Image: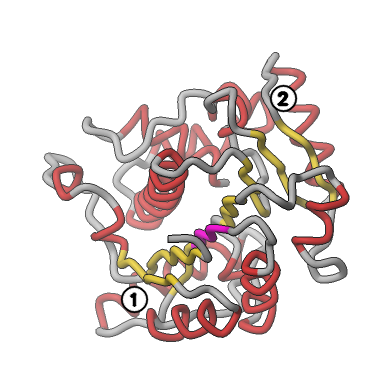
């Protein structure tokens, strides 16, 4: 569970923290006690450590980019137990796009935790309705720019579905940024073994990966979708270098990367 990994990062990993989600543990509530306890009980387990790195790096990368723009609309696709809406600058309007069942659980968790924020819940299955359409219906301003974060999602989509998501974001009339993370094929035996462990853990949890992309494939998909400004960023380069000068075991891995695509300069 991504929220448990973000919460555990603040408890078991040394400073400087890669990302500080101060509300994840609170939002988890009783249902998240077991995965959080497991993370805290085995902080040096290579798979659990890799999950903490993955979820914190992608969140920090996306939120730092959003903060560096003047965009005031943020669509969190596959939001799960994301906490940005409760930590955010009040001037940012947040649209959480997820399946209805997931959103029901999220809303119950937020109510139990006493959390509120500038969030609009957008129940949707993007396999049936494009992102730009459901956001229009939810009241997003089509004349204003949009920031789309699809974190922890691309590996569960086919490449065609990733392309459809990118095209829907690129079509936003007011201009858009898209950030997503993706798994890429291993380049050596160590990376292969590491990736297989993480993939097996995801499959055991009921969510097997569907796709991987090379950095070049991710860039090509975004450009074909209509984004003129595109870059794929290895995990190591996604954070300020000083954050990797560490005394603990957190090290960037070669199993994933991030994509930032924009229709505005």
Mark 2 lies on a secondary structure that is helix
What predominant SS class does the magenta segment belong to? strand
Q: Judge whether 27 appears above or below 146 on screen.
A: above
Mark 2 — residue?
Answer: 110
Neighbourhood count class around disc 2 (C-alpha, 10 Å): few under 14, some 14–19, many 20 upward:
some
Nearest the viewer among 201 and 191 is 191
Mark 1 lies on a secondary structure that is helix
Dividing the image into 4 quarters, which one contains the C terminus? bottom left
> Which numbered disc, 1 or 2, marks the residue closer to the eye?
2
Query: Is residue 179 found inside the magenta-colored segment of the image?
Result: yes
Q: Are marks 1 and 2 in contact (CB under 8 Å)?
A: no
Which residue is pictured at 60% across the width and 62% down the height?
153
Which residue is pictured at 44% across the width and 79% down the height?
219
Q: Residue furthest top?
A: 114
Left or right placement of residue 41 versus residue 13 in this view: right
Magenta range is 176-180
Q: Position of residue 82 (x, y in %)?
A: 60, 39
Left or right placement of residue 174 versus residue 255 in this view: right
Left or right placement of residue 30 versus residue 199 in this view: right
Neighbourhood count class around disc 1 (C-alpha, 10 Å): few under 14, some 14–19, many 20 upward:
few
Mark 1 — residue?
Answer: 193
């Amino acid at each position: 569970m991504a929220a448990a990994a973000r919460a555990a990062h603040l408890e078991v990993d040394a400073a400087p923290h890669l990302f500080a989600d101060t509300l994840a543990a609170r939002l988890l509530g009783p249902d998240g006690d077991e995965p959080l306890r497991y993370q805290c009980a085995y902080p040096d387990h290579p798979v659990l450590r890799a999950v903490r790195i993955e979820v914190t790096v992608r969140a920090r990368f996306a939120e730092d980019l959003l903060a560096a723009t003047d965009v005031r609309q943020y669509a969190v696709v596959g939001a799960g137990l994301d906490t940005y809406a409760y930590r955010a600058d009040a001037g940012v309007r947040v649209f959480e796009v997820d399946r209805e069942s997931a959103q029901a659980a999220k809303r119950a968790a937020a109510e139990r935790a006493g959390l509120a924020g500038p969030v609009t819940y957008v129940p949707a299955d993007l396999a049936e309705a494009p992102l730009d359409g459901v956001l229009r219906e939810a009241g997003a301003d089509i004349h204003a720019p949009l920031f789309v974060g699809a974190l922890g999602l691309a590996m569960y989509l086919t490449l065609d579905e990733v392309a459809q998501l990118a095209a829907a974001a690129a079509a936003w009339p007011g201009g858009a940024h898209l950030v997503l993370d993706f798994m890429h094929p291993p380049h050596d035996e160590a990376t292969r073994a590491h990736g297989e462990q993480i993939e097996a853990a995801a499959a055991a949890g009921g969510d097997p990966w569907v796709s991987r992309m090379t950095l070049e494939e991710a860039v090509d998909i975004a450009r074909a979708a209509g984004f003129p400004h595109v870059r794929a960023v290895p995990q190591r380069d996604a954070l300020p270098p000083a954050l990797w000068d560490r005394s603990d075991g957190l090290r960037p891995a070669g199993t994933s990367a991030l994509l930032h695509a924009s229709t505005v300069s």
